[in-house]
Image (cartoon, grey):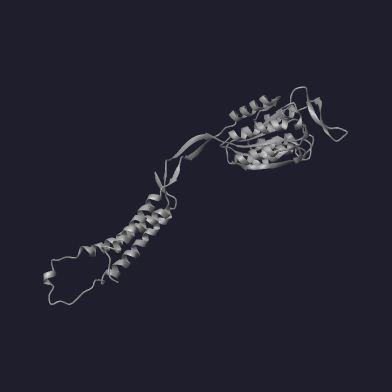
Amino acid sequence: MMQLAHPGLLWLFLLYIPLIAWYIMRHRDAYPSMGMSTVSWMAKAGRPLRQYGLYFLFVLRLLALGCIIIVLARPQSSDAWSTSKTEGTDMIIALDISSSMLARDFKPDRLEAAKKIASRFINGRENDNMGLVVFAGEAFTGVPMTTDRATLMNYVQSLNREMLEDGTAIGDGLATAINRIKSGQAKSKSIILLTDGSNNTGIVSPLMAAEIAHKEGIKVYTIGIGTNGTAPYPQINMFGRMEFVPQPVVIDEGTLKQISDITGGKYFRATGNKVLADIFAEIDRLETSEIDVRHFSHTEDIYFPWAMVALGLLLLDLLLRNTWLRTMP
């Protein structure tokens, strides 16, 4: 299928009207004459072939101009448009980056494991509009809703513990995510909230944020990350150095379950890297919404042949004008 990148330039073909009118007016009385006693003997002679050749030169120039106009309009070849059904949704990942996320019951630690698996999850959701919220003692939007996978994954990889004041403001993190996603256009809106602790700071309570999410039609999938029993948590010793000390793993699973129940989501407990990867895979299967996507397979410029034809016509015009159809000044 052929199309034009700049079809509006075809209006330049209207230049043919004044050019043809000018040519007719210019050549109407342009033929030389001389007085003779009688011309009856020339009545049947007709016009010389060279006279028609001069008209042919004008036609060559019009054709060359037409080819140049088509070149400017940039003809292109393409395969076809196609419409397909695919799955897409609005989604935000709300990620806890508090100091306890440095615990080493995951490899290399909880935060790095979550970053790696979240990046893989983001990369696989090609048709989603996604964003990222991070929280610790406070919450903020790392990446607003976007379809730019590279930006999202680069930001996830740049996350570190020092970005926020320490603490675990689950309610604020969820509320911030709700504010970002509630204006989305997709039928399905969801938040994946990942934390390893209990709400101990912030302005908004987790259950209040869950009620707001429910009113906005937003599902919240909560993930409690941490092994069962004890885990090596980071601790600053008396010399100002970080060391890892075994401590009990305490996750407020009751609150996380309530959040998911209120919003129609689901609660998961991640006790290791593989379990966390499986949880994201399950959410990937659960959270889909069918949308129409149009695909265009291929487009390629094909103006070069038209340019060569225009060049050939101009060269032919130049050749004839200086040989067989040469005229006196």
Of the pair 76 and 253, the residue shown nearer to us: 76
Q: Residue furthest left?
A: 41
Residue 219 visible here: no
Residue 128 lies in quadrant = top right
From the top left corner, tell me how far across and down residue 87 is, in percent: 54, 34
Q: Quadrant of the C terminus?
A: bottom left
Nearest the viewer among 147 and 259 is 147
Q: Nearer the viewer, residue 320 or 296?
A: 320
Location of residue 259 in the rendering, given as x and y in whole percent from the top left corner: 70, 31
State the residue at coordinates (71%, 42%).
140
Farthest residue toward the top?
229
Identify whether 212 is placed above or below 33.
Answer: above
Extreme-right residue of the structure: 238
Question: Furthest residue to the front?
Answer: 323
The structure residue drawn at horizontal position 69% and vertical position 42%, both measured from the top left corner, is 141
Residue 21 seen in render? yes
Q: Residue at x 20, y 65 (%)?
A: 48
Tell me the quarter of the picture where residue 315 sits.
bottom left
Q: Position of residue 101 (x, y in %)?
A: 75, 32
Q: Quadrant of the N terminus?
A: top left
* Front residue of 219 and 97: 97
In the image, residue 30 above or below residue 130: below
Q: Is residue 87 shown left or right of residue 135?
A: left
Quadrant location of residue 231? Answer: top right
Total marks placed: 0
The residue drawn where x is 31% and y is 66% is 23
